[in-house]
Amino acid sequence: MQGSEAVAFRPGVMLLFVTLALLMAAVVVLSLGAGAVDISPRRVLAIFAAGLGLTDQTATPREALVLFDIRAPRTLLGLLAGAALAVSGALMQGLFRNPLADPSLVGVSSGSALAAAASIVVGDRLIAAFWPAGTTLPFAVLPAAAFLGGLITTTVLYVIATRQGRTSVTTMLLAGVALAALAGALTGLLVYVADDRQLRDLTFWSLGSLGGATWTKVAAVAPAVLLVIVAAPVLARGLNALLLGEAEAYHVGVAVQRLKRLAILLTALAVGVAVAACGAIGFVGIVVPHVIRLACGPDHRVLLPASALLGGSLLVGADVLARLLVSPSELPIGILTAAVGAPFFLWLLLRGGRGTFA
Amino acid sequence: MSLLTLSAASYGVRGKTLLNQASMTLRPGELTVAIGPNGAGKSTLLRLCCGELAPTGGRVLWDGADLASIPPWRLAAARAVLPQASSLGFPFTVAEVVRLGMETVGRKLPRAAATAIINASLASADVGHLTGRSYETLSGGERQRVHFARAVAQLAAGRAASGRDDLPQALFLDEPTASLDIHHQLLLIREARRLADSGVAVFAVLHDLSLASSCADAILLMRNGEIVAQGAPDMVLTPDWVRQVFGVETEVLQASGGGPAFAYRLP
């Protein structure tokens, strides 16, 4: 590592990644152990060591069931969804050149949630009308709807905001606010016509939860999230240049339209997949990238992978709290992230003055 | 030899013609200055020249090829732009902002070479002492100088990456002195002149006639979206032309030890 700080990453980048990796390991061990069936972190480590043939403390059947069939998929799903949410936030803030931009701000999350709600309420009625009594909605419909909703919202947004091959960020932000309001109103309408059981499902969905995680769900979500995590850093240099402005990014050699299209596509994919996996969990996408920027600056080459790490840890950590606070029941995780995230967002607004309102 | 040629290039938007049939040439080693009242089309001309806008009529040729056909990353190695004002709402340091100019062009440069370029560029814009400062804490003039350093670094990185010291290059400066104090105005113009002397084709939009006539090889005088006169400073910046274009009376004074100085009054 020769040369001055001028071209290298900021000092502390290595330290940041080591810290984030350790944090993630700690949170994962906690998450595997915490809950109605309590397994101490030491016991969790011992069981995994036994799996590698290092000790002979094998798990009891009950422990094995809880660890491998319930908590392991739940923890993995949390890591994946948290990473997806944080990376989508970082991408969107780069795209909009505004550290306050967030998928929930431009209606992408709302679109996903609307489609999910529609699949619960409308899907139920269609089934009641056309299929024999007792048939339930296939499990895959809801995640697929959430993903499609996110993609459709993003595409509509992009079409509205693009004139003659140029995307206006201002139009996109304002159109996003309008779309979010529209999606919110339609979701409200669905809530109004929903019956009691559907209402419970809708609440669960709109507050977000990692409950109900299965290996099937993990396997469905993992490829898309990994694709986003691997592909996003490829855009890092372009996104760095884009922070100067669209014209300036073109001046320094970035194919701006292509960059924006790719960033939008990856954002839609990440948000859709996260909402599909665990409902509308807010504020991860705005808190995580901000913390990383405070630690190591706005360079996307660091920001994107570091956000993925911290986002995963944060969501799994929040899930541990959600399970512990009202054990043996659990809180919807979205309540926790909002309780931390919303004041944080307000603090960002009040601190202001750093071009965040530009 | 010409690096950039506009032949009867026009640009209009929503039925309004911002630039009408402009023809001009930028040559390596020459500093060309566009002068004219507000709204005369100077910035439109500059944005057409740097490929940001495509002409709605006529042609813009870069080294004989249609400018729009050159991919941005290749063009960026040969031309840099200092825009009128840049907004940047993220906490970069000054050195990082300069590095943004090399994000595409200097991607493959060894770290030592890139660092050397950044440090030299910072020094040339007299912002070397601000290297580690947060960009957001700088004044308007300091920011302008940092962006000048960024453009200079981009060109240096373009030469280094292509391995050609004689790579034909162009630098576009849109009102580069607008928020600078006198000292830094002169420093910046001296740097622009030095770059031109080293073979770069420099194009600047300026408002100060004295500054323009002291540094320019050629002046483009613009009004109402048209280039009304072009040529050597002493041919174009005459009291007659200035009266026609700006509607002010001028007296050209000969300052001792410098170029001509202009004194103005309303008629």
Image (cartoon, coloured by chain):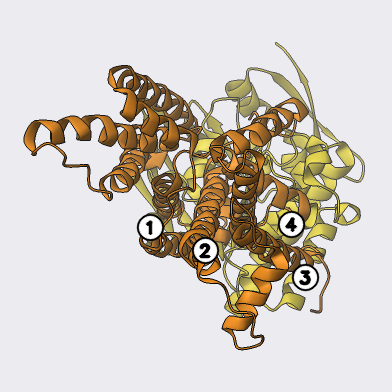
Q: Amino acid at mark 3?
A: Thr
Which amino acid lies under the numbered mark 1 shown in the image of this protein? Lys
Q: Is residue B228 above or below residue A147?
A: above
Residue annotated with mark 3: B115
Residue B56 appears anywhere in the view: no
Residue indicated by mark 1: A217
Q: If you read the primary sequence from the N terminus, does the residue marked by circle 4 or circle 3 appear first? A: 4
Query: In x, y percent, where is residue A127?
Result: 14, 36
CA distance separating discs 3 and 2: 46 Å
Residue B96 shows which numbered tag?
Answer: 4
Q: Position of residue A90 (x, y in %)?
A: 57, 49
- Element type where label 2 sits in the image: helix
Chain letter belonging to callout 2: A
User: In what element is the residue under mark 4?
Assistant: helix
Determine the CA span between mark 3 and mark 1.
47 Å
Q: Quadrant of the N terminus of chain A?
A: bottom right
